[in-house]
Amino acid sequence: MEWLDALILGLVQGLAEYLPISSSGHLEIFREILGIDIPKDNILQFDIMVHAATVLSTIVILWPMFKKLCISFFTFKRDRDFWYVCKILLSCIPVGIVGVFFKEYVEAFFGDGLKVVGVCLFITAALLTFAHYSDRLASGRMVNPGEGHKITWLDAFIIGCAQAVAVLPGLSRSGTTIATGILLGDRRSEVAQFSFLMVIIPILGEALLDTKDLIESSAAGTQTGLSWGVLLIGFVTAFVVGCAACKWMLELVKKGKLVWFAAYCVVMAIICLLWQS
């Protein structure tokens, strides 16, 4: 992988992580377009780094809220912010189970062409469309359309299950979790923030483990296949673009404009399946 490839993939990750179009799926698509043929271990290594970059951009954009939540949780204030963090931790359990017990099965879907990506993009489109029209029907019965209710403990767990399923390439994590929250009747603005915050723990945990392995293999003189320079270019690009995309997505969710991305996902799904055939 060259530095230009890393730059392009970092740009793709920064945009697609927040927009409901699947960052993992689009990374697969652009690897096919760019003709990048590297081992699966190196693909996952790069993907983890750029995902960590977008997690960092989430922290930067939501810093006032993130800081307040951290202070409340680590000082055991037992206030609303403390329990909000507990809901985030609850939502991380399903994806944690997938990461511990089914990691090898999930990794097998990466780097194996675009058929799975195409099918999952169709599913993403269906989820976004269903959530949009369900939200419109619910809004018609509300005094204040679009308000919804706060995320409950059960909602947090169900959204967490949705995140665990969305580890598949092509199934948008943000689209799946936000659509699930909307279907549950949660506030659009709150479910978007919750969706972006709940991914911080699993992605950073995976990134730390991957970084440790990278340092150990470098110290042992083992060939990793990807240079630190390539990883750094991808990381910085994903972070900068991710900051802009995060702010944009928060506004889009408030306005209920996600259905337009469903049409985009359908088009990309068709392209993926035709490309693979």
Image (cartoon, helix red, strand yellow):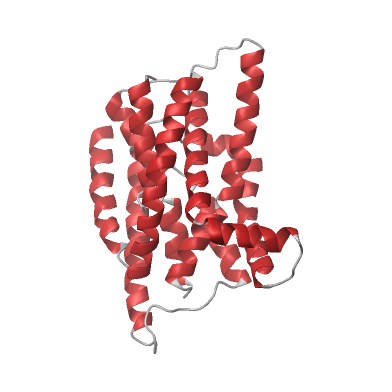
In the rendered structure, the answer to whether residue 212 lies left or right of residue 160 reads: right
The answer to whether residue 277 is seen in the rendering is no
In the rendered structure, the answer to whether residue 180 lies left or right of residue 68 reads: left
Q: In the image as oriented, which residue stretches furthest toward the bottom?
A: 143
In the rendered structure, the answer to whether residue 215 lies left or right of residue 32 reads: right
Examine the rendered structure and indicate whether residue 109 appears above or below residue 251: above
Q: Quadrant of residue 145?
A: bottom left
Quadrant for the C terminus in the image: top left
Indicate the position of residue 105 as horizontal and vertical percent values: 55, 37
Residue nearest the observer in this picture, 115 or 143: 143
Quadrant for the N terminus in the image: top left
The answer to whether residue 60 is seen in the rendering is yes
Identify which residue is drawn at 48% across, 29% down: 46
Q: In the image as oriented, which residue stretches furthest toward the top?
A: 221
Identify which residue is drawn at 49% across, 39% down: 53
Residue nearest the observer in this picture, 253 or 269: 253
Identify which residue is drawn at 37% across, 65% down: 253
Indicate the position of residue 96 as horizontal and vertical percent values: 64, 48
Q: Quadrant of residue 217?
A: top right
Examine the rendered structure and indicate whether residue 20 appears above or below residue 7: below
Identify which residue is drawn at 64% across, 33% down: 209
Examine the rendered structure and indicate whether residue 154 appears above or below residue 122: below
Indicate the position of residue 236 as horizontal and vertical percent values: 44, 34
Indicate the position of residue 188 as horizontal and vertical percent values: 43, 70
Residue nearest the observer in this picture, 259 or 5: 5
Examine the rendered structure and indicate whether residue 139 appears above or below residue 213: below
